[in-house]
Amino acid sequence: MISFWKAFALWLAVVRAAAFLAPPQTNLVTAADATVRMDAAAAAPSPIPIPAPSPASFLAFGDADLRKQVESDPASLGSLSVGSPGGGVLINGIVFPSDPKWTLANADGNFATAETIGFVRRAIENVHILFPDTPPLTIGDISNPQGGQLRRHAAHQVGRDVDLGYFYKPGKGVWYTPGTAANLDLPRNWALVRSLLLLTDVDTILLDNRIQKALYDYALSIGEDKAWLGHIFQFILGWKNAPIVHIPLHRTHYHVRFFNRTAQELGRRAYPFLIELKKIPPPVFTIPHYVRAGETLGHLAARYGSSVRVIEQTNGLRGNLIRAGQTLRIPLKGAAAPPAAALVIPARPLAPRTPAILAAVEWPTPLSVYGDDLARLARSPLPIRF
Ligand SMILES: [Zn+2]
């Protein structure tokens, strides 16, 4: 047990130092799966290599073999995302690497899964390929090294949420300047959003309606398909599966949440073994609770198996008065509950055509994905999703 913790601490130190010191390759994984590598083939070489995602080959293991792997070499699993963004943990988190194409806004809270890091890099690099001389994009909060609650965020607990700044017109804005149609560099912002949607496994982009409208108007003006845009931006049709969703307080940055094919699924399956074999301590994590009229801290403590004092401390409350409409963080001890069912990632929203201004890179299209499989195309929920 002790020797494991020594080894684990050493491994973590190596991985984190590796991310800063630019070695030729980190020792994060032993068998990278080429199919989940997110490195853009056409992208300029990055000064710091992005760690490889968790080996997808472990997903083929049965439970007994996976348990053995957890027992003998937990580090080999790579970064794992367990639980939900509002209540979960990050295992083997990796510090977001440095790169001239982006700036990290904060000194801490910069840990993610390898897949998340690869996605963010892929999208930013695509903007650089389309628009040379693009200034660095600011990256804000991501996750704590072991996940769990990050500052006052409701999410950001599992290494799959990343706050991204906007591209502004020269001299018109810095990190957290509220975006407007006048100060935003709309071509670069739209290229970023389109790259996230089409080139990564994006789950949701939380974004104020006013920014959505500016991007929508711009996208329409350069010749994007109107019906497709209607299903991308929730504010147009109110489509519940739209990936770009309004949320208050998101006029200053994009909050981007990714699916992680391997880190989530491997995390879901390996987590019980990591706990059982004492490879990680049972974490304390928090979930949000929206206070309704008549509820007291005593109710919440009883409902969640917590205590009034612990809830007070977690939320920095000075007394035990709470009010309806308030959202409190409820700390829960024990396992982050991984979802029971295997992860299903919805189809990426394929754009039926590419405006000329964006034609310098290859985008997935209905033709490149379906070929002449029109039957499959017809079965898709939208003509442009697969
Ligand atoms: Zn956020």
Image (cartoon, grey):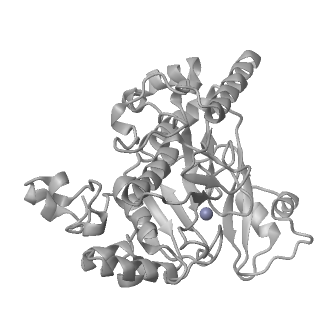
Is 46 situated left or right of 251 in this image? left
Residue 352 falls left or right of residue 358: left
On-image quarter of the C terminus: bottom left
User: 166 above or below 40?
Assistant: below
> Against 232, is 140 above or below?
above
Q: Quadrant of residue 349?
A: bottom left
- Location of residue 306 in the rendering, given as x and y in whole percent from the top left corner: 78, 56
Residue 270, placed above or below residue 244: above
On screen, residue 18 versus residue 63, left or right, reads right
State which quarter of the image contains the N terminus. top right
- Name which quarter of the figure residue 188 lies in: bottom left
Q: Is residue 160 left or right of residue 228?
A: right
Q: Is residue 238 visible?
A: no
* Residue located farthest toward the right when viewing the structure as drawn: 318
Could you tell me which residue is drawn at 41 percent across and 61 percent down?
131
Residue 16, position in %: x, y?
66, 33
Across and down, in percent, residue 371 comes to 11, 53
Between 203 and 14, the one lying in front of the other is 14
Q: Where, by quadrant of the figure, is residue 137 drawn?
A: bottom right
Whether residue 71 is visible to the viewer of this picture, yes or no, is yes
Q: How many marks?
A: 0
128 vs 191, nearest the viewer: 128
Residue displayed at 55% across by 64% down: 255
Q: Nearer the viewer, residue 218 or 61?
A: 218
Residue 116 position in % (x across, y down): 50, 47
Residue at the spot x=8%, y=59% of the render? 374
